[in-house]
Amino acid sequence: MEKAILSVKQTLKERVKADIAKNRERVKELGPGLITGGAGDDPAGIVTYTVVGATTGFSQLWLLLLSTPMMIAVQNLAARIAIVTGKSLPEIMSTYYSKKLTVIMILILALANILTIGADLNAIATIFQMISGYAAVYFLVPVTALIAYLITFGKYRKVKSVFIGLTAVLAVYIVSAVLARPPLLVLLKNTLMPHMQTDSVWIVAALGLLGTTISPYLMFWQASEEREEKKSVVQADEVGFDTVVGMLYSNLLAYAMIVTGAVMLYGTHGEIDDVATLAQALRPATGDYAFALFALGIVVAGFLAIPVLAGSTAYAVADTFRWREGMDYKVSDAKGFYVVFIGALVIGDLIDMFPGITVVDALYYSQVLDGMLIPVLIGFALMIANSKTIMGAYVATRFQNVFSFFAMVVTLGLTGVMLWQIGV
């Protein structure tokens, strides 16, 4: 009897050790999905989420909960395609569908990304302006040069570790939400009970929330990074863990931003449309400590998101025209890739310096372009992921199909609303 008990204990002990070892390996493999999740909360997204809380209170928290499985499904779909085929979405679309349509889609993606890069660079420069007193324009070129240097001359694995470190720092927004002391019962009610309002302010905020949460550039970035990690086909079913962690973390940050905006600003302030007015509104409500957390988050989010935006543009353009691409290559070995990468940063700077374009304009038009592109991209990803000719035995799972299709329908509806609003 004692021997049997000892045998059971030994078996359980071995299983626990095996589970611990497996989980350690999973944590070590965290990368593309976690970086993608953190990059989704860029300075433009921070403004959007905080303004959602400031204008609609806690009433849209349930939408964020609903968007989480959609994000996971769409990102997993893109990553699965890249790992199984060893090719990017533009390469597959050009080969099996239409090269002209692919080029048009990539041009729309590039334009939307560059507009967002301009808005994000402006946000970082604005924070430095508020801290130092010097004009924001003096910080644009140094910030851009630093990001360009980090990517161009840094080795990929070192860059990856920097990105993951920056992703962790974004947890300051969770701290900020806790410091705001939101009413827990009200949070639970608005998170778990779906409800809608018909006024224009609520609808516009909902469009901004979902449009910011599900972005085309994140699909291209994670797919390219999964491929650059050189994962084997058998790992296609394992990539979900990294994506789930990344998307949950992304939406947890977004949740915290909405909560902070709702507690501190709902019903107390007028229109908030950029980082400067948002920061000025938060400062008297939160004090210098919480303002410092907000400012730190903006800067860190920008340094994380801007390389992802420029990188996703470079990957997409290079893959469409079959250029050599990837951050593992030196500049001399992948000139086209790095020209697009640096070019996207430079044009983003020029947008900020052009007097006729405001940050609000850049954010608005990038959101319109993303809204038009994402349902089309999801549609193509679904067709590719369910093609046995392309994917073989690794076609999309039921979860990926159901929630990706749901995301496509929702984003298509948002596109219709946006086009109706602008009178198209």
Image (tube, rainbow, N blue to C red):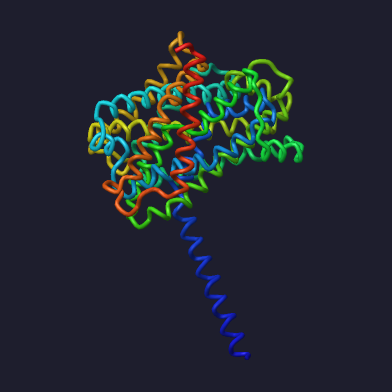
The answer, for residue 6, to whether it is visible in the render is yes
Residue 46's image quarter? Answer: top right
- Left or right for 392, reference 171: left
| 389 and 245: which is toward the camera | 389
The quadrant of the image that shows the C terminus is top left
Residue 331's image quarter? Answer: top left
Q: Position of residue 44 (x, y in %)?
A: 53, 26
Residue at horizontal 37 percent and vertical 42 percent from the top = 223
The answer, for residue 163, to whether it is visible in the render is no
| 139 and 65: which is toward the camera | 65
- Left or right for 44, reference 329: right
Q: Position of residue 208 (x, y in %)?
A: 55, 25
Residue 176's image quarter? Answer: top right
Q: Position of residue 378 (x, y in %)?
A: 40, 35
Residue at horizontal 57 percent and vertical 75 percent from the top = 12
Residue at horizontal 45 percent and vertical 8 percent from the top = 356
The quadrant of the image that shows the N terminus is bottom right
Q: Position of residue 111 (x, y in %)?
A: 38, 22
| 223 and 164: which is toward the camera | 223
Q: Is residue 87 above or below residue 359?
A: below
Q: How many marks?
A: 0
Q: Is residue 394 above or below residue 102?
A: below
- Farthest residue toward the top? 356
